[in-house]
Structure formats: structure tokens, C-alpha cells
Amino acid sequence: MSTGLKIDELERAALSGKIGRRDFLARLLALGVSASSASLLAMHAEAANRNQAIRRAALRDEYDYIIVGAGSSGCILASRISASGASVLLVEAGGADLSQPKIAQAQLWQQNLFSDTDWGRTSIPAPRLGNRPQAASGGKIWGGSGSINAMIWLRGDARDYLHWEEQVGPEWNLAALHRAYLRLATPQVGARPLRSPAGTGPITFGRYAPQHPLTPAYLAAGREFGLGEIELNAGGLLDGIGVAEVNATADGRRSGPAQAYLVPALTRPNLTVLSDTLVTKLELEGNRCRGINTIVDGVPKKITAARETILCAGAFESPKLLMLSGIGCADQLAPLGIPLLHEMPDVGRNLQDHILLLNILFKSQALLPPPVSNGASAFAYFSNRSRQWAPDVQVMCLQSPFLTSTLPVGAGFSIAPFLVKPRSRGTAKLVSADPRKPLRIDPRYLQERTDQDNMILGLDRAIDIGNSRALKPFSAGLNSPSLLNTRSEKLAFIAQNGGAGFHYVSTCAAGSSPGNSVVDARFRVWGVDHLMVVDASVIPEVTAVNTHAPTMMLAELAAEQLGMVPQI
């Protein structure tokens, strides 16, 4: 058994209270963990165990702040707000076991998909994707999707954020977003060049992909097609190709929002976390949100928020809670017997997601080395439109076959295009007044012809790069029986191999007026006092990069607006 697995098992035992602090420390030291690291792990395990047991038993009727959802944003806000001394209740529908190997170890992240740590949602059949329902995965665990994702660390393209400011307001300006980004993470020493802003936040990220031989070859392939090499997280324009970075440590352990923000905050007596707890609806009184209705250990309970109730439940659960509480579209709520308390038609609309194209596999000339860290090497960006806009397509190099068993690890590699700036817009609709029932999710993938054109662009560029001179030493050719010459052949391949990008946003979109959005520039629900939404659902337009870092950046922006962050 590997040392990493042994450490994970010890953490699980400590978190569940099966072994004491002294025994935990002794065993960690015996495995070669440094005294300082062992002490920190022991403190975190002890704090988590105490928080879950003692504070759950002493649950109060009122807190200053109630945060619904211990996902990426919820972890950040729970940490930032509790540091002020205010009392905070964080309620999470999922569990707390962060030490299980599929979460803790970067190389095992794919094991989370469709497992007990995934909500396991699906969309309705997608007509443009072979009438196949698509997975609508999300993390059901402390850290949310930040605890089960691939840990790809991408800051984003400045042009996207300029368009956010145009749509939402001056509070979302580049300077404010820059400050928020710098508070998120600190780069691993020696793992990246120093010309980008370093950042001072608790999350660790690094550049480990150059250790794999596919990485320099992929960069050289990009140069064959006119792409300049760029640093992806410099905060500029993503017109080029660059080396992947990942929010994990050098020894391959996830450094996500739960690990970096929430667990260290559990030592504070004013922070209470309720895991495995369902929030059924919000408690509304006129135009004010008073708190939540929840079920604690099988017993219904109302809990009041003296200052703010903050939804951080994600792109599906946040709009769902609003609708269950009577905030939404009358035509949808009335047939379900839900009284309309606040008309807001845009709740659940404007759903956006990236589209991932799988099964662009290249057989290897010889056995490839094992994947490094999360297995991502580099990202190339392409577009069909002017440089006024962020790129439409992201093409990622994976060091092994990605989400497929067609080829074993070492026998090939994947090049995976994402449609990252879709024009199609979908919906997430309530189908029942029962809070346990899932939404009807319809992302409307590829409904716009522009999206089809850009997905073909991604397919073409992925094949071109895979067949490049630079990758010839590694590639024995495309492992696909499909004919991919005509538009119809390419669309047929996309229909069978395209799918969800797992980057859902915009169902409670922020905007400049209640006529076209759900929350304002300060994350407050239009027309409802003391109610905020801070998660991926408020993003007005999906970014040209994976949405994890941008979503957390917005959580830091919200914390700043609440006066809860140190000044940089």
C-alpha cells in the first residue's frame, strides 16, 4: 500500500474519531510526514470531528449568517465571514469525508464522477448529442465540485471579465476581480515562472506538467499552427498555447476550497457546519428573507439569519431553492402548488455549459510514462471571430486516454476540445414541490449553428495537432474508425462523442436590472432583502476557461463587498 493511501486512511480514522490525536501524530511521523505537517493534519482532523459532533448537538435557532452549500463559494465565505467573529452556520447536503483517496489524490479525481460524492444528476435527452441524456455532475461533499473536479487552474481571459462588467456593473471591474483572484491561491515555489502575479491565498497550485514528455511536444505542435506560447494565468488574453497548472501540491494532493479554506476555519467556535442536511426552502416574510427551513437528523427545523442568508448551493440547487420558496416564474410555480411570493422569471433560465468532445484518441508509438498530477499537459485556444472576444474553443492535451477504456493507460493519449463560448442557452425547471426531486435540466447543447461550427473547429484542430510533426515521435495515429471528412460526418461524430463540460453557470445570473437578471452587482437577489446568491449560478456569461477559479474569485469579491477580507 502506498504512503499516500496510508495517510488518507489515517485521516479518515481521525476525522471519524476512531483514533486519538496522539496516535494519529505518531503514525503520521512513522510514515515520514514532517512534524509540522503532521501537527497541522492532526489539528484539522480534531477540529472537523469536534465541529461535527459537539456543535451539531448545540445547534442554535439563530446565527448572524446562514450559508447554504459548502461548495467552493460556501467554503470561502464561511472562512472569511467567521474570521470576523460573526456567528456562521454552514449547511451542506453532502458529507464531510475529505480524506478518501479519490478526493485527496489528484490522479484519482475521475473516480468521483457518478460516485457517492457526485449529485448524479442528468439532463433530458439532448437532440444534437444523439438524443442522449447528459450527466450534470456536481460535488456532494465539503468543497462541492472543488473536491471532485480535475483541479485545472485557469484564471480566465480579461475580455470575458470586461464583458461581465458591462453586463453587471462597475462593482465587477477588472481591478476588483484582480484583487479577488490574488486572495485565492499561492503558486508552488519553483513550479512556475515569476512574471505572473503570485497571489497570497490559501490554495496551493503549481505547474507539474513539464515533467511529462507530451507537454513540450504539444507546445511545439501548437507553434506549428501559429500559436504563440503564453502563460495561461497571467491575466491577459488567451490567444495561444500554454502549460497546464493544477490546484494540487507537488506530492499530488488536492488543494481545494474545503482543504484550504474550510477545514482550517473549523477551530473557530463561531463556525458551525451541518453536513448531510437538506435545506427544504427559504423562510420569507414579505420582502425579507428570515432564514431557512431544514431537516436536521430527520426533524424539521427553522433557523434564523440575523444578518444574511447566502445561497452557495450551485447552478442547480440555488435556483431550485429560490423556486421552492416562491421566487421565480408564476407560470411554473402555480401548477406545482407553490405560492408566488416574488415574481422573477429569470430564475433557472440562461443555463450555460461548455461541451467536451471525447474519444479523440491517438495510439502511442511506445509505452508512455504515467500521467503527472491530474494528467493535463497544456491548453491551446482557437476562435472563429475577432480578437475583441475571448476564444471560442479550448483544446486540451491529456497524458492518457481520457474518460474511456478504449485504450489502457500508457497505450495512447487524448486531445480533448471544449466549446467554451457557447451561444445556446438552456433552462433548469422545477418539476415538483418536493425538495428531494431533481430539476428538469435542458442545456440545449449545440442548438445554435454557431456552436456547431465552433465544435467542428475544435475537432479539426485537435486532429491537426495530434497529426503534427512535433507529436509524431509519440503518436501512431488517430484511433477512430469514423470518417471525418464532411460536415455531416463530423457532426455525427460530435453527436456520439460530445457531452457535458460540467461547467454549469448563469441560472441566477447577475445583471444591471431585475428585468434581465436575478442578483445585482453585490450578489443580492433583486427585491428580497437579506438574501444573496454567491456561486457559479450568478456568472452572467460562461468564461472561456474551466469555471472553478472564476467562481471562487467571485466568492472572494463577495467577501470583499461584505467587508470580510484583508486588504492586499
Image: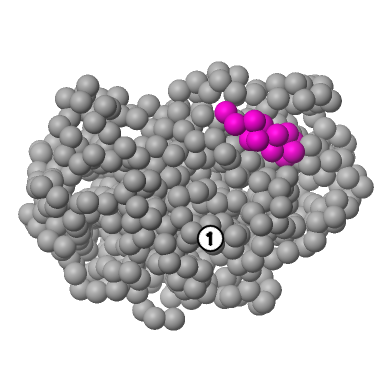
Q: Is residue 2 above or below residue 324?
A: below
Residue type (three-letter) at the residue carrying disc 1: Tyr
Q: Nearer the viewer, residue 515 or 374?
A: 515
Q: Is residue 422 above or below residue 191?
A: above
- Is 567 one of the magenta-colored residues? no
207 sits to left or right of 124: right
For the question of whether residue 119 can be seen, the reply is no
Q: Nearer the viewer, residue 265 or 250?
A: 265
x and y, in percent, of residue 530 in the image: 19, 57
For the question of whether residue 418 can be seen, the reply is yes
- Is 448 one of the magenta-colored residues? yes
67 sits to left or right of 341: right
Instruction: Give the number of marks.
Output: 1
The part of the image, by quadrant, that contains residue 464 is top right
In the rendered image, which residue does mark 1 sit on?
161
Is the C terminus in the top left, top right, bottom left or bottom right quadrant? bottom left
x and y, in percent, of residue 365 in the image: 87, 40
What residue range appears in magenta? 447-459
Residue displayed at 66% across by 70% down: 192
x and y, in percent, of residue 186 in the image: 52, 72
247 sits to left or right of 64: right
x and y, in percent, of residue 386 in the image: 71, 52
The part of the image, by quadrant, that contains residue 454 is top right
Q: Nearer the viewer, residue 37 or 381?
A: 381
Majority secondary structure of magenta residues: helix
Residue displayed at 60% across by 60% down: 159
Residue displayed at 75% across by 21% down: 488
